Amino acid sequence: MQTLVAAPKVKLAPVFETSNGSVYQSDNENCWYVDFAGKFARFDYRCMMKLKKAVLGIDIEALLLATDKAPDVEIVFICACDHCYVLTLLEIISFKELLEGTFVMLELNRIIHDRVYRLSF
């Protein structure tokens, strides 16, 4: 006889969203979920930082000014993560906007928490 264990529902709190994607935080799992380019992917802190570094490190200006006949796509592969994104130039710009907004909101949350915690004690 097979025993099935149902996983508890994961509560996702929206961190930041744009018209092209959104990022959610799961406090139960200590991770983030990124909904972008038709993909809903789970990232822990380390992988989220690697994703940010990889996407923000793409030089859009160099890609736009390139005169070679290479396709206008970029493959974002993060070492030690199971996720890979194949993005066009417009998707890269949208992804950068999403990640920058996400990390601004996380920093704002940290600042507010520090101020409230400091004032209460």
Image (spheres, helix red, strand yellow):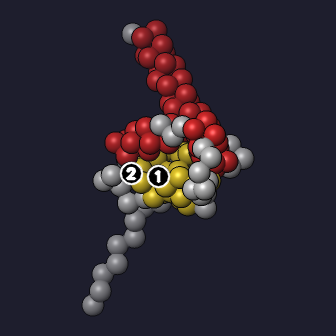
Residue 21 image position (x, y, % from top left): 63, 49
**In the figure, 105 relative to 111: above or below?**
below
User: Which residue lies most toward the front here?
Assistant: 68
Measuring 53% from the left and 52% from the top, which residue is drawn there?
Answer: 74
Element class at badge 2: loop
Please say if 106 is above or below 120. Answer: below
The Cα–Cα distance between marks 2 and 1, rounded to whole angstroms, is 7 Å
The reply to whether the C-beta atoms of the residues labelled 2 and 1 are less than 8 Å apart is yes
| Residue at x-position 49% and y-position 25% | 107
Q: Residue furthest left?
A: 1
Q: Quadrant of residue 15?
A: top right
Which amino acid type is shown beneath numbered disc 2? Ile
In the rendered view of the protein, which quadrant contains the C terminus?
top left
The residue depicted at 27 percent of the width and 90 percent of the height is: 1
Tell me residue 8's x, y (percent).
Answer: 42, 61
- Residue 78 is marked as 2
> For this view, does 107 lie left or right of residue 2?
right
Report the residue that reaches farthest toward the right: 19
Q: Give the numbered dot on residue 45.
A: none
- Residue 49 visible in the snapshot: yes
The residue singled out by tag 1 in the image is 76
Quarter of the figure with residue 46? top left
